[in-house]
Amino acid sequence: MRFLSFLPTPAGTVLRYTVSLAVLGWLAGRVDWARFGGWHGLDLSLALPAALLAGLAYPLQAWRWQLLLRAQGLMLPIGWVHRVFWIGQFCNSFLPGGVGGDALRFGHLWHIHPDRKTAAAASLIADRALGLGTLFALAAMALGLHIAVAPGGAELQILFVASLATFSLLLAAGWSAIRSLWWEPLSVRLLGSERAASLREAAGALGRHHATLVTATALSIGVWLVDFISLWLLARSAGLAAGLLDLTVAGAAAYVAAALPISIGGHGVREGSLVALLALLGVGIGQSDRVALLAAAFWTVSVGWSLLGGAVWLVTTRSTRPVRLA
C-alpha cells in the first residue's frame, strides 16, 4: 500500500519515467542497427500492414465504449465518442497515472451530462473490465493450447493458472455486480441511499442490455485478435519464425504488464515483458537482436497511433462547435 501511495508523488512519477526509459534504452542497445541498416531491417511489405492493422483496434474500442454509453442512456454522436476516445488514448500513453485518459473521458462526459456521473463512470468501468476480461480469457486459451501442443516449464503453467484465475474472478465480479446486487447494502452505507440508487440503476442498465454486452464482448475479442495478428506480422517482418499462438501468449503478457503502474503508459515494461515471454517460449533463440528489433517496432507502432490522439486533441481545442446530442 505504501508503494501505491508513493507512485502518484513527484518522486514516484520520476521513478516510472526512469523505468520506461531504462528498459527502452536497454532494448535499443540490443539491436545491431548497423547490421540491419536501421529500420530497413524490417520487411516493410509485412511491417506496414501490421502497423495499419494495429490502428484498427482503436476504432473498435471506441465503438465498444459507445455501445456501453448507449446502454446507460447516454446518446452521444459517434464523432464525439471517437474524438474523446483518441484523446484519452494519448493521455493514457504519455501522462503519469495510467488512467489519465479515463479521467479525461469522464470529465468530458460530466461536462455534457452533469446529472449522469454514475452512468458515465459505469460505462468506463465496464469498458475497462471487458477489455481486461477478454485479454485474460484469450491469454488462458492461448497458454492452454500452447501447453497442450508443446508442454513447457513450470513458468508457463503458473501463467496459465494465473490467467484463468484472474479471468474467473473478473467474470464472477462482473456477473454478480449486474445480476445479484449483493453489494447494494454496502453501497448504501458508504455512499448514501441516493448515490447507491444511481449505482444500482447503472448496473441494472448493463444487465438489461444483453445484446449490447454480447456485442461489446465480441468487439473486445476482436480488438485483441487484431493486436496479436499485428504483432505476429511485425515478428515476421523482423525475420522471426514465430507462430501466431506464441505471439498471442507473449502479447497478452506484455499488455498485462503494461497495465501495472510501474511505468508511464506501459512503455518499456510492455516491450521488456514481450522479450522475456518470447525467450520463455523459445522464440528467437540466438536472434536476440531481431527480438529487440521486434520490440522496438512494437513500441514505435503503439506510440505512433497514440500520437494521433494528441493531434486530435490539438484540433479539438481549436474547435468551438457545440456537441449535438444524438
Image (tube, grey):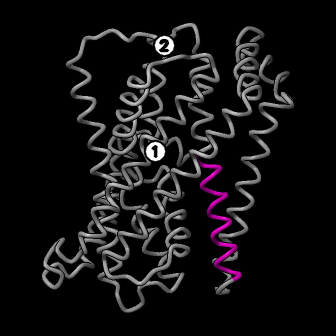
Viewer-proximal residue among 154 and 212:
212
Q: Main secondary structure of the magenta part?
A: helix
Which amino acid type corresponds to the residue marked 1 in the rendered image?
Leu
Inspect the magenta stretch and tell me whether residue 137 lies in it. Answer: yes
From mark 2 to mark 1, how far is it between C-alphas? 40 Å
Please indicate whether residue 207 sits to the left or right of residue 233 in the image.
right
Q: Identify the disc placed on residue 31.
A: none
What residue lies at 72% left-to-right and 47% top-to-bottom?
A: 170
Which amino acid type corresponds to the residue marked 2 in the rendered image?
Ala
Q: Position of residue 180 (x, y in %)?
A: 86, 31
Q: Which residue is mark 1?
A: 7
Q: Position of residue 200 (x, y in %)?
A: 76, 19
The quarter holding residue 238 reads: bottom left
How many labels sit on residues?
2
Depicted 19 relative to depicted 58: above or below: below
Depicted 85 relative to depicted 14: above or below: above
Q: Which residues are magenta?
A: 131-148
The quarter holding residue 116 reads: top right
Ranked by sequence position, the earlier of labels 2 and 1 is 1
Please indicate whether residue 99 sits to the left or right of residue 27 in the image.
right
Q: Position of residue 163 (x, y in %)?
A: 67, 62
> Mark 2 Cα within 10 Å, few/some/many (few <14, many 20+)?
few
Q: Which residue is mark 2?
A: 326
Q: Are marks 2 and 1 in contact (CB under 8 Å)?
A: no
Q: Nearer the viewer, mark 2 or mark 1?
A: 2
Viewer-proximal residue among 182 and 319:
319
What residue lies at 79% left-to-right and 16% top-to-bottom?
A: 188
> Mark 1 Cα within 10 Å, few/some/many (few <14, many 20+)?
some
Disc 2 element: loop
> The N terminus is located in which quarter?
top right
Q: Position of residue 319 (x, y in %)?
A: 23, 16
What residue lies at 39% left-to-right and 39% top-to-bottom?
A: 89
